[in-house]
Image (cartoon, rainbow, N blue to C red):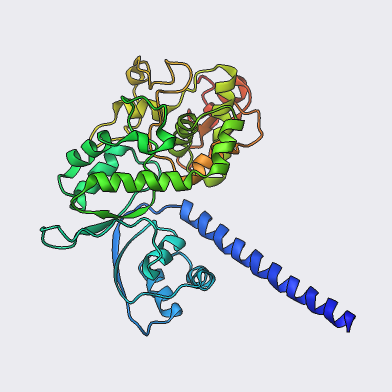
Amino acid sequence: MLRILVQSLKIVSVIALTLLVAAASVRFFDYAVSRARPDDAGQPVSITIGKDDTTSQVADRLEQQGLVHNKILFEGQMRLSGNAFEPGSYTLRKGMTVQQIIDRITGAQVAQAPANPASNDSGPATFDITIPEGWRTEQIAEEYERLGGKGGYDAFMQALGGVDRSQYDFLAGLPASSSLEGYLFPDTYTFRKDDPAADVAMMLDNFGKKFTPDMRQRTSQMQLNIPDVLTFASLVEREAQVPAERPIIAAVYLNRYEQGWNLEADPTVQYVFGKRGDWWPSPLTEDQLQTVNPYNTYKTGGLPPGPICNPGFASIQAVLFPADTPYMFFVAKGDSGEHAFAVTKEEQDANVAKYQTGGDATP
């Protein structure tokens, strides 16, 4: 009898472990896929789910519309969620993760604006908006305007300036003159059409939830503060195109910072010269690179005054848990999105010659 009981417990343990591994694998794959954001990220796609639709039928529809990359992944994560579809018509956006889609079509979405029955505007009182990682606040304001937010670009930017910062512990100590760049967490939201202040508050609330107590503790262990982490993460977000390189690029910037070097990050100069219609100008001119500005990390030491964009979770994690590497330099390998890394200036010059100057050894 005891032997049978022990064998039964072993079987139950194996099954439980298998389910845990499967769940972790599905979520990891979802995360990895979500990092390869499509070029048309944010493009709205309408989809209708009927009360008799099966998970397989919905998965086929999502895959055909380009909303999910792998219907098997969707079906597996849908089963793991334990939720059921809510029949209806939905506006989803390309670039949403599988979990975000599931939350939306099962009614479990957390980033939801409260209803506003007092609105007298015709049409829906809310709209869905997807904020990709790496957008600056002005790009979010433009998207708010494009999707019909009341007051458009100017109203959204004014709402940012009107935030009561005392309501958010992570904004404590942030100078009143500082923007909220970096704190508008990239995600898919349902915005209220006529209340940009409520929309901004929703994004800040989301950031407060995503930047967990463990992450705050790790920030302190690194002898940094939250603005420091977000500033480093914003550089990583704008530089890294290959997910696996994020912790390495984070390590390079942290190494430079600890050694007292200038960070020399092109995106900080782009941030200075960005304007409507061209928020991230490239290539940069020599005059732009030589411009004296607190955000120009070629000319100014230390960190810039604040983040240069709103980084996503992966870039923040890369800063909190950087690669253990002595690299001090990196250079893009053409247009592949990958970088070559180096420890010494001589190695960097060789990489520049190989990948940027067609073999010319002069950097």
Residue drawn at x 39%, y 54% as measured from the top left: 38
Q: Quadrant of the N terminus?
A: bottom right
> Is residue 41 rendered to the left or right of residue 144?
right
Q: Nearer the viewer, residue 132 or 359?
A: 132
Residue 197 picture quarter: top left
192 shown above or below 335 = below
Residue 92 picture quarter: bottom left
Residue 183 seen in this snapshot: yes
Instruction: Count how many numbered circles sit on residues in the image.
Output: 0
Residue drawn at x 18%, y 38% as measured from the top left: 154
181 shown above or below 82 = above
Please state the horizontal and vertical placement of residue 290, each as a whole percent of the image: 37, 15
Residue drawn at x 62%, y 28% as measured from the top left: 327
Please state the horizontal and vertical placement of residue 241, each as a whole percent of the image: 47, 43
Q: Nearer the viewer, residue 52 or 193?
A: 193
186 shown above or below 96 = above
Please state the horizontal and vertical placement of residue 261, each as a whole percent of the image: 54, 17
Residue drawn at x 33%, y 48% as measured from the top left: 202
Q: Nearer the viewer, residue 343 or 210?
A: 210
> Is residue 247 rendered to the left or right of residue 50?
right
> Is residue 259 rendered to the left or right of residue 194?
right
Residue 248 seen in this snapshot: no
> Is residue 340 rendered to the left or right of residue 165?
right
Please state the horizontal and vertical placement of residue 129, each as a whole percent of the image: 29, 54
